[in-house]
Image (cartoon, grey):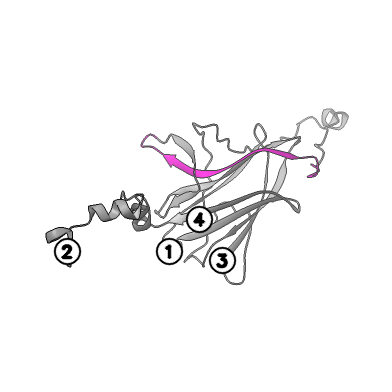
Amino acid sequence: MRIWAVTIVLTSSLLMSGVIHTSALANNAKTSSQSISQPQPNNSTNISVTKAEFGVAKVDSQGKITFIPTMKVPLEKGKKYGWRIQLQNVKGEVTWREVLSLPKPPETWATDNGENFTLSSDGTEAISKRTQLPKDGVIENFWAIAPGDPPGKHKIQVYIEDRLIANFEFEVVAQQQQKLNNSPLRSQSPRQRSQLEPTGVGGQKSRI
């Protein structure tokens, strides 16, 4: 399991966070005479969520990325999944905390950007903490499937301070299970399935 931390432009308005850089002025007198207003910290009780989405990020051959809302993630190496949340009444940077829960420990956990990252004692839960400057009020985080990641039910909870702002329950599906779920036989009723089974003489079902 690896955090996918790449700055990109998404075709479905999936907005990546920016980074603020400040530079010192060469003229000390001018610097001392200027008053720089510092952004006030956000109060989580004033922040509201207008939209919360979970899905996968699909990358085409030209590097164009499309966000596809879904609660089922194929268990394929490199498959990217995650969330984006639209906030209202937010000023400046936001510090959020994400709790990712897996059905069992993966073979590896990894993060690329040196963020605040901790694991539970049994290795099934990862807690990530990051400070982002929302762009148009959007914050997000994405993971990439790695070899040894488990299939099954997963859950992501997102907090600002101690306030839960989003809960996503999704399933990572192995390719074999996904093919079974998409099988025409699985979507039909028992009566319809019986009509497709081979029959012997006189309408008796053949024994194989």
Q: Is residue 201 left or right of residue 157?
A: left
Q: Which portion, as a residue range, is magenta?
A: 42-62
Residue that appears at 56% across and 68% down: 123
Mark with earlier residue (2, 3)? 3
Camera-nearest label, 2 or 4? 2
Disc 3 marks which amino acid?
Answer: Thr
For residue 137, what is the image quadrant?
A: top right
Residue that appears at 17% across and 64% down: 206
Confirm or deny contact between disc 2 and disc 4 (CB under 8 A): no
Disc 4 marks which amino acid?
Answer: Arg
Q: Position of residue 17 (x, y in %)?
A: 62, 38
Q: Nearer the viewer, residue 100 or 39?
A: 100
Q: Is residue 93 left or right of residue 71?
A: right
View extreme (right): residue: 33
- Label 3 sits on residue: 124
- Label 4 sits on residue: 2
Instruction: Check residue 206 in the rendering and tell me which mark sits there, or answer none.
Output: 2
Distance from the alpha carbon under mark 1 to that under mark 2:
42 Å
Regarding mark 3 in the picture, which secondary structure is present there? loop
Confirm or deny contact between disc 1 and disc 2 (CB under 8 A): no
- Label 1 sits on residue: 148
Regarding mark 1 in the picture, which secondary structure is present there? loop
Confirm or deny contact between disc 2 and disc 3 (CB under 8 A): no
Q: Is residue 29 left or right of residue 89?
A: right
Disc 2 marks which amino acid?
Answer: Ser
Count all numbered tags in the image, as a single digit.
4
Mark with earlier residue (3, 1)? 3
Disc 1 marks which amino acid?
Answer: Gly
Distance from the alpha carbon under mark 2 to that under mark 3:
47 Å
Q: Position of residue 125 (x, y in %)?
A: 59, 63
